[in-house]
Image (tube, rainbow, N blue to C red):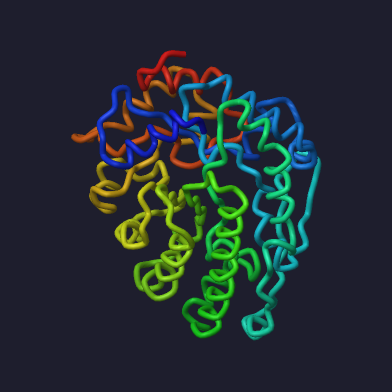
Amino acid sequence: MTDKQWQLLLSVLNGDSHTPLPVGFIIDSPWLPRWSGMTIMDYFASESHWLDANLTAVRRFPNALFLPGFWSEYGMCTEPSAYGSRCTWTEDEFPFAQKVLDDHSQVASLHRPDPSRDGLPPFVLKRLQHCQPAIEAAGHRIRFAVARGPWNIAAFLMGTTEFLIGLRENEDESHALLKNITGFLVDWLQLQKRTFPSIDGIFILDDIYGFAGPDDLVALGIPYLKQVFSAFDASVRFFHNDADGLACAPYLAECGINLFNFSFEHSMPQMRKLVGDSVTLLGNIPPRDVMASGTAEAVREAVKASLAGVEDTRRIILSCGGGMAPHVPTENILAFLEAAGHKV
C-alpha cells in the first residue's frame, strides 16, 4: 500500500467522507497466481514469481486498496506448520494443514512454537525481507502483521468438528489450547512488527468464529481475539470472518477491531446496526457467484445493490463479502471500480 493509500484508509477509519467510496480487496493465493498466469506452487515456491504477481496487480488496479498488500503467506499452512502440522502440497490446488491432535488429552503436552524458528513463519519473513527493496521502490510499504486467528488455528490442529464440540464438552482443555495459540500469535505479530517497523496494522482471519453462538464466543472466543488485537498498538485492526458474522459482530469494537470484512449474506445496514458506528465495513458483493462467475454488468448491479438502505456512507469500503475468489477476471474488477465511480 502506498503512503497515499494508507492515509486514505486511516481517513476512512476516522469517519471522514469520501467520494467516490474507496474500493478495497483482500488478495492472496486463491486469486493472484492464476490471474497472473502461474500455478499456486510456483507462487509459493518462487520469491520472484510472488513479487511479480503482486506488483502486476497493484500496477493494473492503482485505484484499489489491496489488503493487506504484498501478503507473504502459504495459504492456511503458515501458523499450523509451526505446531508440526504436516502440510500437503499439490501443483495447482490450495495446500492443507493436517491435524496434530487426536483428542483433548494431548493439549497439555502441546509445545508453544517460536515463530522466529518453527515452521513456515521464518520463511514468510525472509521472503518479505528479500523483496522489501523492490516493494518500496514501487512506492509501497509493508503495512500489516498478518495471522490466522486462534479458533482457525485450533480447528486445523484438532479438526473443526472436534474443536467446536470441545468448546462445550472439554472447556478446560479448550481454554488451554486457545491460551497456547494466543500466546504464539502475540509473539508472531510482535515479531512481524519488530522486523518491519513500517507495520501499523494487524490483520486477523478467522472464519471459525462464524460457527458458534454468543455464549461460546463470550466464554472462549472474544477474550482471546481481544488479546491478539492487543499484541501491539496498531492504527488499523482488521478482522475477516466471511462465515456467519452476526454473533460476533456486537463484540468487535470491544476487541479493538475497527475494520471488518464480513459475508455477503449480511447486508450493510444489518451489519452496521450490529457493529456500531466505530467499525468500518469492508464488503460485500458475492465473491464467487458474482465477482468470479458473473458478467461485468452483474458486478456493476451488485455494487449498487450493496448500498441499498445505507443512509450514511462513512466508514464503508466497497469490496467482496470475503477475499478475492479464484478466477475473478480483470474486466470484473474494472467493472467494480467503475460502478464505485473510479476511473479505470
Q: Quadrant of residue 159?
A: bottom right
Residue at the spot x=71%, y=54% of the render? 96
- Residue 337: x %, y % from top left: 43, 21
Which residue occupies the extreme left position in the image?
Answer: 311
- Residue 40: x %, y % from top left: 74, 38
Could you tell whether 196 is left or right of 245 in the image?
right
Could you tell whether 270 is left or right of 265 in the image?
left
Residue at the spot x=44%, y=40% of the render? 321
Indicate whether 301 appears above or below 100. Answer: above
* Res 285 seen here: no
Residue at the spot x=80%, y=45% of the render? 90
Q: Is 131 or 279 nearer to us in this picture? A: 131
Could you tell whether 197 is left or right of 16 in the image?
right
Indicate whether 177 appears above or below 125. Answer: below
Which residue occupies the extreme top position in the image?
Answer: 344
Residue at the spot x=75%, y=67% of the render? 84
- Residue 146: x %, y % from top left: 56, 51
* Res 231 seen here: yes
